[in-house]
Image (cartoon, rainbow, N blue to C red):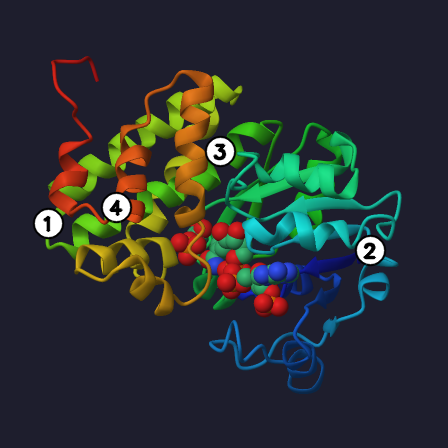
Amino acid sequence: MTNVTVLGAGAWGTAFGQVMADAGNDVTMWAIEPEIVEGINRDHRNEVRLPSVDRLPDAMTATGDRAQAVAHAKIIVVTIAAQYARTALEQFRGLVPDDAIVVSLMKGIERGTNKRMDEVVREALELPADRFACLSGPNLSKQVAAREPAAAVVASENPDAARFVAEAGTTPYFHLFVSADVIGVEMCGSLKNVTALAVGMVRGAGYGENTAAMVQTRGLAELRALGRAAGAADATFSGLAGVGDLIATCGSTLSRNFTFGANLGKGLTVDEATAVSNGVAEGVPTVGAVVELGRRYGVATPLASAMSRVLSEGISCEEMLSELFPGGVTAE
Ligand SMILES: NC(=O)C1=CN([C@@H]2O[C@H](COP(=O)(O)OP(=O)(O)OC[C@H]3O[C@@H](n4cnc5c(N)ncnc54)[C@H](OP(=O)(O)O)[C@@H]3O)[C@@H](O)[C@H]2O)C=CC1
Ligand SMILES: O=C(CO)COP(=O)(O)O
C-alpha cells in the first residue's frame, strides 16, 4: 500500500484515483472546489467531473488543503488542465516530500513558453528529473472509470521511479508498461490532441473513413517528425502513448478534442464549441505551441498550422484540408 495524492479531481484525475485505489493504495484527491471535496468525502462521488461513477472506492478521500494533501504522499499525480499547471503547482513548491515521485498525466504544451508538461512540472516544483514520471496512453476516462481493460505507459529517466509507479498503479483491468522516453511520451500525448481536433473536424463536416484516416496518418507523421526533432525515441510513436492514443482519441465521441473538432466541422464557432465542451480540450491551446515548436526545430507542421488557422481565423474544413498538401510531389 502506497500513499498516493492526485492533484486535480477532474474526469481523468478521479478515474485514475480510482485505479490507484483499486490497486490497493490509499488515495487523497486534492481539488480547489469545496463541492468536489465534499462530494468525494460524503457521497463517494464526483458528480461535477465524473458523474458516471456511482460510488468511488472507500480508499479515496479528498481535501482542499495543499499541505495536508501531499504531506504523506509517496506518489503525487498531477492531472490539472495543462495551461493552469504551472500556477497551480507553484503553490505546492516546498510542500512536496523529498522522496515523493511526481507523475504527470497531463497532455498539453504550455502556451507562451512552448514547454512540455515534464518541463513545466519540474520547473514549478523545482523537481529533479529522477523524481519525475509521465503517464500516457489510450485512456478515455469514462471507460477506465468503468473498469474496462486498458493500459498506458509510464516514462521516467529514472527506471526505479517508473517501475515504482507501474507496480503501484497496475490492477487486473489497468496495465502499466515502463519506458525511459519522457520526451516521446509527452510529445505523443500532446500532439495527438491536435490531430484529434482535425479528425473530429472532418467527421463533423461529414467526410468518411478515407479522409479521417488520411488526416490521422498525416498527424502521426507530424507528431513523429516533431517528436524526433525534440529528442524522442522512435519506438514510442508506435506504442500506447502514440498510435494507441491516436486510435482511441480520434475514434471516440468521448474525446473532448474529437468532439470539439466535430463541432467546428458542423459549423460551430470556437466560442460555441468551447461552451459545449465537456471538460478541457487540450488540443486547442496546444495548437499554437506546436506550430512554434515546429519553427524552432525546423520541422514542417502543416496540420497544426492549418488547425491554428481554423481556431484563429475560422477557415473551413475544406481550406484546412487543402493546407495539408501545400503543393508539389513529396515522399511520404
Ligand atoms: N479525460 C480523459 O480521458 C483524459 C485526460 N487526460 C489529461 O488529463 C488532464 C486533465 O484532464 P481531465 O481531468 O479530463 O479534465 P477536466 O476538464 O475534467 O478537469 C480539469 C482539471 O483541471 C483543474 N483545473 C483547471 N483550472 C485550474 C486551476 N486554475 N488551478 C487548479 N486546477 C485547475 C480542474 O480543477 P477544478 O475541477 O477544481 O476546476 C480539474 O481538476 C488533461 O491534460 C487531459 O489531456 C489524459 C488522459 C485521459
Ligand atoms: O487523452 C485522452 C484519451 O487517452 C482523452 O482525450 P480527450 O482529452 O480528447 O477527451
Compute the Cα span from label 1 to label 4: 22 Å
Residue type pointed to by label 1: Tyr
Q: Earlier in the sequence, mark 3 or mark 4?
A: 3
Q: Mark 1 touching mark 3, by CB under 8 A?
A: no
| Residue 240 in sight in this render | no
Compute the Cα span from label 3 to label 2: 27 Å
Residue matched to label 4: 313
Query: Who's the residue at 46% across and 27% down the image?
Result: 293
Query: Who's the residue at 73% across and 45% down the image?
Result: 102
Q: Mark 1 touching mark 4, by CB under 8 A?
A: no
Compute the Cα span from label 2 to label 4: 45 Å
Residue matched to label 2: 73
**Where residue 23 sits in the image (x, y, percent)?**
67, 59
Badge 4 marks a residue whose secondary structure is helix
Mark 3 Cβ inside 8 Å of ligand 1: no
Residue matched to label 1: 207
Query: Height in image: 280 above or below 195?
Result: below
Residue type pointed to by label 4: Glu
Query: Who's the residue at 71% across and 30% down the image?
Result: 159
Of badges 3 and 2, the one in the foreground is 3
- Total count of labels: 4
Badge 1 marks a residue whose secondary structure is loop
Residue type pointed to by label 3: Met
- In the rendering, which numbered label is found on residue 187? 3
Query: Height in image: 181 above or below 246?
Result: above
**Where residue 37 sits in the image (x, y, percent)?**
69, 77
Of badges 2 and 1, the one in the foreground is 1
